[in-house]
Image: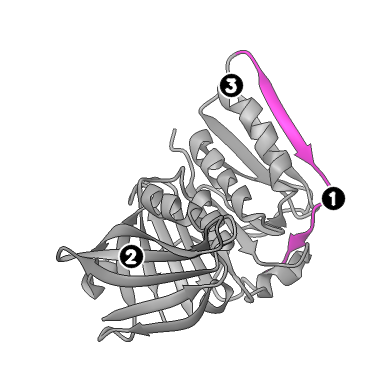
Amino acid sequence: MRFRTLVTNSNLLLRVVQSIDKLSKSAILKLTLSKLHIIVITDMDSGLQLWSDIAVDALFGEYQIESIHNNEIYLEFNIDNLQRALRSTQGGALGVTLKLTKKQGLPVLSLTIRSQSVTGREVSLCQDVPVRMLTPAQMDAIREPMVPDGQVHIMMPPLNNVRSIAERMKGMGDRVSVSANKDGELNVRVANDLVDITTYFRGLETLAYDTTQEPSIPDRASSEFYTAVVDMKNFLRFLQSYHVAPKNIVCCIVEHHAVMFYVYIGSAGYSGAAALNDTACGSLTYFIPVRQI
């Protein structure tokens, strides 16, 4: 088993790790020949899940990976440890190398950062992140949630606007209602015994999907809303994805099941429906199950 690479975009890798910092203490890293996958499962039965894939070329150069498992490597790591190591790469590093190795018989991701001292001398800093190796059988047991087709897909408004509103709402209830229709309207609502507050977004782009593969419930009028009620804490965790500076985010409502957010990273700018074909860098997919009453 071998993994070694130059980190050519440590800033993006750091921002991805920062975006998952509030989700859990640990995450799974799946390395393949063409993609890096980060998976976070907060609760196998009822909690938020994150499934991400990022093109190797968007992060690395001189990428080398070998294993007897179809050249794939599976690791579990502490998010805070990797985040601290990646912060050391900021501030003018001359070069960053990442490799899988062993220290005192235990597997670690070793990050070597070359930089220049104030006297002009080149210095190297090594940061080791302990990891736990996972077997293919263990990875096979970890699967993306199966959900029905979404009834509505809508482009999200600027994430910082939504985040600012949600931060004000969080003290008013432990659940939030997310509603959207096919006329490009999105509502975010929180209510308790004393107040009922709704924020309205209008003029958003909706996306069409082919749902002819399986029977579905008869469609509603385009002005009628589809709604999912989810945990406020999970909604706020998704909003941490602002760290990756996403340009395109698709909200998919699967009524009575979940809200799913597809966060596309690496885009040059807002591209609406074209975001669905944006494979130049990668995406983060957040699965937030409905709150059971």
Which secondary structure, mark 3?
A: helix
Which secondary structure, mark 1?
A: loop
**Residue 247 falls within the magenta-colored stretch:** no
Q: CA distance from mark 1 to mark 2?
A: 46 Å
Q: Which mark is residue 109?
A: 2
**Dot 3: few (<14), some (14–19), or many (≥20) neighbours within 10 Å?**
some
Residue 139 located left or right of residue 233: left
Q: Position of residue 290 (x, y in %)?
A: 49, 43
Magenta part of the chain: 194-209
Residue 272 located left or right of residue 2: right
Q: Amino acid at mark 2?
A: Leu
**Dot 2: few (<14), some (14–19), or many (≥20) neighbours within 10 Å?**
many
Q: Residue furthest top?
A: 194
Q: Residue at x 71, y 51 (%)?
A: 156
Among numbered discs 1 and 2, the one appearing first in the sequence? 2
Q: Which residue is mark 3?
A: 172
Q: Amino acid at mark 1?
A: Gly
Q: CA distance from mark 3 to mark 1?
A: 27 Å
Q: Are marks 1 and 2 in contact (CB under 8 Å)?
A: no
Q: Residue at x 82, y 45 (%)?
A: 202
Instruction: Examine the rendered structure and indicate whether residue 118 appears above or below residue 140.
Output: above
Among numbered discs 2 and 3, the one appearing first in the sequence? 2
